């Protein structure tokens, strides 16, 4: 454990000895040992060289000077007093020696430059190793001086050892735990406080870029607040608005904040953080039929401008606030967002612990910008988060149990499309049919079997007869086997399981049986249940293969979990018990009292998180809001305000925003107004003095110029659908399934020993051409187009999207059937809405770029169109309808043999295609090629 | 044949095409975030140690092959065959607990090669190259659940999301051929449990992601435009796109991502012509094809993969991972494992001999393993045709070529094959050893992410020296 201690050395490098080596005396050497070198040896070397006396690597023992002088296997002394360049211990630590291997072996643990200086200075000055008395003497003498150099102590609930509890912190790394300070700014009432704070922080001599033009601004604001482009009419109206720029823009912001699509855009951001998916991940990847209701809850919360503190409380403890309010049960879906399952191949306690660890860390990252998992196995290496806090927070969830709870549908929920359930019912019917046929095969085989083993034939036949008489409809063979076993008949005297199956029958049985299980989850989608939790005892469950309902005896049956600190995070190694608690480092700011009762723990905890005095909560959300507008957060790691996260570039601004959120009664919409009406937000992305900008602000942290961004995966897809007129803008509802590459749609996907159903697109264009937020998100099958444009994996919280440029994006955008269909539809729309070629092209530019073409662009695109038309065939190639069924090939796991089976794709029988090349004339198809260019162009893809 | 699989574009079973052109494939996944970023992240680099192995072919037997029925004979099981016992406890999964019975292997074993390596008799072809193989029986993993165990074997971390070994290796060594991705994956038609996360780049830059080649349909999605779009038509569209993007860049001179995105289109256009050639098997002789078992129904599929792996190694691809499975034989192990062994035996033996005769075996490390081993016992599920359940405590991994300790069997499991008892190492040590064979030091192959230096072994590990010649 030693190397986990005294990490303050990392920070004390800031306070190095700083004396020239030649002036060091023997006393300095002693002091240097006590102050620096002793702890350094303990931290960096002792783990392998003396910490465990029975296992000393290379025979080198660093516990004493004698050990160092004796050296290790090499036979050479490790330290040559006075000569660091001849001392192997120093040479190893420099990692530059040809003769001595690099120490410590892990690169991540290498000595810093300052630490190397300490070691070198200590050897130069004689490598003193004072005895215990002398060490104490030195410590006493310098106690105060060193304490002030080392930083400040922090009060927490305490670490596993005194060293951790008493360690000192660099105050700069503790910024997030300080109370939020609102600056009293002297504004004349006209300047936005944000602008004052940003300009105050400008590097000397830097000037801001001018305000962006109206066309740029409305596009920027529309995408930022709704994820969709403005219509050409909206752009025109804004351009024509005689009001002054700021006022006119304020009206745009207000209008966008009222749009129902505002909530969708914000939900996209929020669900990135909370890891939304419609399936459970891992081996089964069962669909979470009810997850969509949580997704829509988030959309509603933003659209209704639900106060953020309430939003927090509902997601953590909605069921405890009011178990009779469906909305609040749905809200707790947040606690269920992580991947989770319990299969028969898993140890139940391990799976339970995985949920507890997941929810503990998720609460930390989402609301408090703290990656708490660092404290799962030990006290946090860098931050004042003891492992005791980790388990105290975990204890809040020790009575939280997973269930799909009854929650009546709300009027505000979109329940259209539920009739698609019929396709699933047909599939269910198929599976049942397979099992019935296999049952019959086995019953017949059983009769043959009894010809050779006649002893129990009568008993068997009698059981079958009774089962039928009792009204049983299916599964006679297994039912009879069960009853034979129950009656104590030896296994050898009744027919074995899966009697006489061929490889194909083995495979079919598994597919049907597991398919029925999977359907239970999918069918739950249309039922009034919520992906939720309840308070209760932890029951003994071996596997979860169907949606779970609240048991009637939630407080009787099961174990009341007694949370303890787990050694190494292992659920089978509990140590010291803990009570439900919070992050103790801010206890003095936000006191809490969490009951130990089964019910009510989460609500008390949620109140602590959502307290106006909790500086982590307010800073976390305003930092995210800033990121969502500027593409850069103020504190660089929105999920990590600890000392390993990037420090805020504008701490005063961050605090001003956090304080203002409270002034605005936690209104998120009010914060958008503050941010978007600032000059900083409205700046051009083009700076008048780029050289100056590069020189004075190389990191681009000043906000002197607006940072362009590539549209996100969802914005790209939604925008294409929007400008062609195909986008169904209905808000909320069950997930939709767009058309994706057939390779992926029909890709056999292994789930728990069987093959998942194929991806079948919704039959009607308006059903599948919905916003990307609503695309069915299976952890094991991500829409490839969205994937390639950096859709984050739902397995981890995404604090910030990537926007890398990789070549597969070109294949997707330039070659895919989806892109071509959008391009063709855009062309058709332009032709339909205009009366000649020039007008049609102008229309295309307006829809895609929100501007008219230049005369040159118009000329060039016109000639391209006409030239292309000559290249196109008179008749387009016909496109195939999607298959009504596919033949699956699989390797059967019982036999290792290949077999095939037919999977019917019922939805495809009602399939209506999007616009097809054959639906339009060659002239329009040629314009489609030009539209494809527009959709691929940088002007379309980037936001300025 | 997937007869309803009606793709409106060219299909590539591994094999059709002509020559390999000279292309800059390295940028296929190149994250060209900045135009001025000239340094090539896939340029070949020296490792931390001199190493014999330059490439790795990783044969992933997904599902958990049984060591007891392949390379680790357990005659003691004969005595307790079908004897019942009960195993319970909260540290057991439902699969492992309850009433169980021991089962002996249905296969006969023999000693092969000068080294006397143990192999089930089903390995008719592999037996001939026994002396090229180093068997390891001491590895343990943490999970008995497929996807988590797969993630751990492939990425070091049970819960996925971390870079795969192939990603780490290409990150550490770059690739020797700038015309192909450094890390290629040949999955089964059916992706393994855990899906594409098994070859993820995790938190490493996107360049290091495994590129799967789909055995059916387009090997890389949307590599070709839909039917009816001619090359000429596409070229003309691309030319106009380029002109429009250039004009746009002039209006936004301070936006430095534009030129990278522009160049990306040219690269993609060349690539869609060249990639099909890169996976062409038509130049191989009839002898070679039959040596790998190509054309024979049982071995065709894996034979193609093995031959393609050899071609890729010849072309300098750093890391190739082949999937086969599923080896998850809970029942009827005789039939199931029998068929699976037949499917890979000849192709793998051919791969070893072929690399050897071309002088490439020394520089190519072959790894054969699953995500865990199997239990000497079976749950009483009423069947008489027994199989085996999952076992995280014992498995057989073998290495060939690449400076491994060929001709030796390292470590041992207990009398029944329940648990490793000699040379026991956690899988992280095996990972560290793999890296060492490729000249990489796990302690130095690190990437700073989410507040700490991450590494393949998660927390560091030890080289299993006995596996290295």
Image: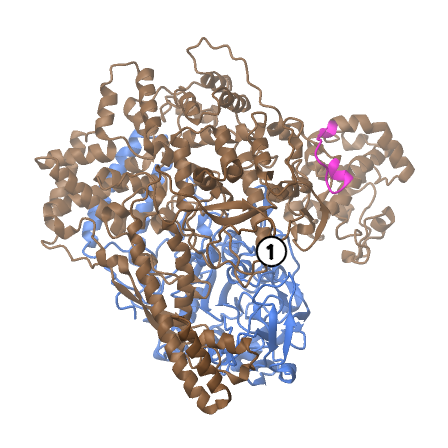
Chain colours: A brown, B blue
Query: Is residue B466 toward the left or the right of residue A504 in the image?
Result: right
Q: Which residues are magenta?
A: A149-165
Which quadrant, please, contains the C terminus of chain A?
top left
In the image, is residue A150 part of the stretch drawn in magenta? yes
Give me the residue at 61% from left, 24% from top: A179
Point out residue A552 in the picture as x, y percentages from the top left corner.
Answer: 53, 51
Looking at this view, name the residue that lies furthest to the top: A188
Q: Is residue A85 visible?
A: no
Give me the residue at 38% from left, 65% from top: B189
In the structure shown, which secondary structural element does the residue marked by tag 1 occupy?
helix
Q: Nearer the viewer, residue A787 or B33?
A: A787
| Res A130 → quadrant | top right
Q: Is residue A575 above or below residue B419?
A: above
| Res A678 → quadrant | top left
Point out residue A599 in the picture as x, y percentages from the top left corner.
Answer: 59, 41
Number of numbered discs present?
Answer: 1
Q: Nearer the viewer, residue A251 or A578?
A: A578
- Residue where numbered disc 1 is placed: A350
Give me the residue at 66% from left, 72% from top: B411
Q: Assess disc 1: are there few (<14), some (14-19) or many (≥20) residues with their C-alpha within 10 Å of its C-alpha.
A: some
Query: Is residue B342 toward the left or the right of residue B234 in the image?
Result: right
For mark 1, name the chain: A
């Amino acid at each position: 454990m030693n190397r986990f201690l005294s990490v303050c050395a990392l920070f004390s490098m800031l306070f190095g000895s700083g004396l020239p080596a030649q002036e060091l005396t023997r006393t300095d050497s002693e002091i240097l040992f006590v102050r620096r070198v002793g702890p350094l040896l303990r931290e960096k070397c002792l783990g392998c060289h003396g910490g465990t006396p029975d296992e000393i690597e290379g025979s080198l023992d660093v516990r004493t000077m004698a050990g160092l002088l004796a050296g290790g296997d090499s036979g050479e002394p490790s330290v040559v007093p006075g000569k660091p360049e001849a001392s192997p211990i120093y040479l190893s630590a420099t990692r530059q020696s040809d003769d001595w291997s690099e120490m410590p072996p892990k690169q991540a643990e290498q000595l810093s430059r300052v630490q190397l200086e300490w070691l070198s200075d200590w050897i130069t000055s004689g490598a003193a190793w004072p005895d215990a008395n002398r060490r104490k003497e030195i410590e006493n003498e310098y106690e105060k001086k060193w304490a002030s150099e080392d930083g400040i102590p922090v009060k927490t609930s305490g670490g596993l050892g005194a060293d951790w509890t008493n360690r000192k912190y660099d105050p700069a790394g503790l910024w997030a735990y300080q109370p939020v300070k609102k600056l009293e700014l002297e504004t004349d009432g006209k300047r936005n406080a944000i602008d004052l704070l940003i300009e105050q922080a400008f590097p000397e001599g830097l000037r801001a870029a001018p305000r962006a033009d109206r066309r740029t601004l409305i596009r920027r604001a529309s995408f930022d607040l709704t994820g969709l482009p403005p219509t050409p009419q909206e752009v025109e109206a804004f351009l024509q608005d005689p009001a002054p720029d700021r006022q006119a823009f304020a009206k745009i912001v207000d209008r966008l904040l009222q749009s129902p699509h505002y909530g969708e855009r914000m939900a996209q951001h929020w669900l990135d953080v909370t890891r939304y998916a419609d399936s459970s991940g891992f081996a089964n990847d069962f669909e979470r039929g009810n997850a969509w209701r949580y997704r829509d809850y988030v959309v509603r919360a933003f659209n209704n401008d639900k106060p953020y503190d309430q939003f927090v409380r509902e997601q953590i403890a909605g069921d405890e606030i009011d178990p009779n309010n469906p909305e609040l049960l749905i809200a707790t879906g947040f606690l269920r967002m992580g991947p989770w399952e319990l299969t028969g191949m898993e140890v139940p306690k391990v799976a339970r612990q995985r949920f507890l660890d997941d929810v503990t860390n998720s609460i930390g990252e989402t609301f408090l910008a703290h990656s708490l998992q660092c404290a799962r196995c030990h006290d946090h290496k860098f931050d004042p988060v003891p492992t005791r806090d980790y388990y105290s927070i975990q204890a809040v969830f020790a009575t939280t149990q997973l269930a799909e709870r009854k929650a009546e549908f709300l009027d505000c929920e979109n329940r259209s499309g539920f009739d698609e359930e019929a396709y699933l019912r047909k599939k269910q019917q198929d599976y049942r049919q397979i099992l019935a046929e296999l049952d019959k095969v086995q019953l017949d085989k059983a009769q043959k079997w009894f010809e050779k083993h006649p002893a129990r034939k009568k008993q068997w036949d009698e059981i079958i007869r009774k089962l039928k008489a009792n009204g049983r409809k299916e599964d006679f063979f297994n039912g009879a086997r069960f009853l034979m076993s129950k009656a104590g008949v030896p296994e050898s005297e009744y027919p074995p399981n899966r009697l006489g199956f061929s490889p194909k029958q083995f495979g079919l049985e598994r597919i049907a049986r597991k398919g029925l299980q999977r359907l239970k989850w999918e069918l739950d989608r249309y039922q009034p249940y919520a992906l939720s939790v309840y308070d209760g005892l932890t029951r003994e469950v071996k596997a979860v293969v169907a949606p779970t309902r609240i048991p009637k005896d939630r407080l009787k049956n099961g174990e009341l979990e007694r949370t303890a600190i787990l050694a190494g995070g292992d659920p089978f190694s509990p140590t010291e018990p803990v009570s439900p608690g919070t992050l103790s480092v801010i206890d003095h700011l936000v006191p809490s009292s969490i009951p130990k009762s089964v019910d009510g723990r989460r609500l008390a905890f949620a109140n602590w998180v959502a307290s106006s005095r909790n500086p982590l909560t307010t800073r976390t959300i305003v930092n995210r809001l800033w990121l969502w507008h500027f593409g850069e957060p103020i504190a660089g790691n929105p999920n990590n305000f600890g000392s390993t996260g990037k420090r805020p570039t504008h701490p005063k601004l961050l605090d001003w925003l956090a304080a203002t959120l409270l002034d605005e009664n936690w209104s998120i919409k009010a914060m958008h107004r503050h941010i978007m009406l600032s000059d900083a937000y409205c700046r051009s992305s083009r700076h008048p003095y780029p050289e100056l900008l590069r020189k004075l602000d190389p990191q681009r942290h000043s906000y002197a110029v607006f940072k362009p961004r590539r549209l996100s995966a969802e914005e790209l897809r939604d925008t294409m659908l929007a400008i062609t007129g195909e986008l169904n803008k209905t808000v909320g509802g069950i997930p939709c399934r767009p058309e994706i590459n057939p390779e992926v749609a029909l890709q056999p996907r292994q789930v728990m020993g069987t093959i998942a159903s194929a991806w079948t697109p919704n039959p009607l264009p308006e059903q599948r051409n919905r916003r990307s937020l609503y695309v069915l998100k299976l952890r094991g099958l991500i829409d490839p187009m969205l994937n390639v444009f950096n859709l984050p994996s739902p397995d981890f919280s995404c604090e910030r999207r990537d926007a890398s440029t990789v070549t597969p994006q070109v294949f997707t955008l330039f070659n895919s059937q989806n892109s071509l269909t959008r391009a063709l539809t855009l062309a058709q729309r332009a032709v339909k809405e205009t009366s000649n070629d020039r007008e049609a092209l102008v229309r295309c530019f307006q829809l895609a770029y929100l501007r008219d073409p230049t005369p040159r662009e118009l000329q060039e695109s016109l000639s391209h169109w006409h030239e292309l038309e000559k290249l196109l065939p008179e008749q387009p190639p016909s496109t195939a309808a999607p298959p009504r069924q596919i033949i699956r090939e699989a390797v059967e796991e019982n036999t290792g043999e290949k077999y095939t089976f037919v999977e019917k794709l019922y939805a495809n029988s009602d399939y209506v295609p999007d616009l097809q090349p054959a639906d339009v004339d060659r002239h329009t198809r040629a314009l489609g090629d030009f539209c494809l260019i527009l959709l691929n162009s940088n002007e379309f893809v980037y936001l300025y | 044949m997937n007869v309803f699989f009606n793709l409106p574009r060219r299909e590539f079973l591994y094999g059709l095409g002509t020559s390999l052109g000279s292309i800059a494939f390295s940028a296929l996944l190149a994250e060209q975030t900045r135009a001025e970023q000239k340094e090539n992240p896939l340029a070949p680099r020296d490792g931390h140690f001199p190493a014999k192995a330059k490439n790795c072919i990783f044969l992933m037997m997904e599902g958990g092959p049984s060591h007891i029925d392949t390379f680790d004979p357990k005659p003691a099981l004969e005595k307790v065959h079908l004897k019942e016992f009960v195993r319970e406890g909260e540290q057991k999964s439902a699969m492992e607990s309850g009433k169980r019975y021991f089962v002996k292997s249905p296969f006969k074993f023999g000693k092969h090669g000068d080294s006397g390596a143990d192999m089930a008799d089903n390995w008719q072809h592999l037996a001939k190259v026994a002396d090229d193989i180093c068997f390891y029986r001491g590895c343990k993993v943490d999970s008995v659940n497929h996807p988590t165990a797969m993630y751990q074997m492939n990425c070091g971390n049970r819960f996925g999301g971390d870079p795969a070994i192939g990603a780490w290796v290409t990150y550490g060594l770059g690739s020797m051929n700038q015309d192909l991705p450094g890390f290629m994956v040949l999955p089964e038609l059916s992706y393994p449990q855990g899906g594409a996360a098994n070859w993820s780049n995790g938190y490493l830059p996107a360049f290091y992601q495994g590129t799967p080649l789909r055995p059916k349909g387009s090997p890389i999605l949307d590599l070709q435009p839909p039917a009816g779009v001619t090359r000429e038509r596409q070229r003309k569209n691309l030319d106009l796109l380029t002109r429009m993007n250039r004009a746009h860049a002039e209006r936004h001179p301070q936006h430095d991502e534009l030129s990278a995105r522009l160049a990306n289109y040219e690269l993609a256009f060349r690539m869609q012509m060249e990639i099909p050639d890169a996976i062409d098997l038509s130049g191989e002789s009839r002898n070679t094809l039959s040596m790998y078992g190509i054309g024979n129904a049982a071995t065709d599929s894996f034979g193609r993969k093995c031959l393609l792996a050899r071609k890729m190694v010849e072309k300098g691809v750093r890391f190739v991972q082949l999937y086969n499975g599923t080896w998850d034989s809970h029942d009827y192990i005789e039939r199931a494992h029998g068929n699976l062994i037949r499917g890979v035996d000849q192709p793998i033996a051919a791969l070893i001999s072929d690399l050897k005769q071309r002088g490439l075996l020394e520089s190519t490390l072959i790894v054969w393993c699953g995500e865990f081993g199997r239990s000497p016992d079976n749950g009483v599920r009423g069947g008489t045709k027994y199989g085996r359940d999952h076992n995280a405590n014992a498995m057989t991994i073998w290495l060939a070529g690449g400076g491994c300790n060929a001709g030796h069997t390292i470590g041992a499991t207990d009398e029944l094959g329940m648990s490793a008892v000699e040379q026991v190492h956690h899988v992280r040590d095996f990972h560290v050893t793999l890296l060492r064979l490729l000249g990489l030091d796990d302690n130095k192959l690190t990437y700073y992410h989410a507040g700490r230096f991450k590494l393949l072994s998660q927390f560091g590990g030890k080289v299993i020296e006995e596996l290295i010649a």
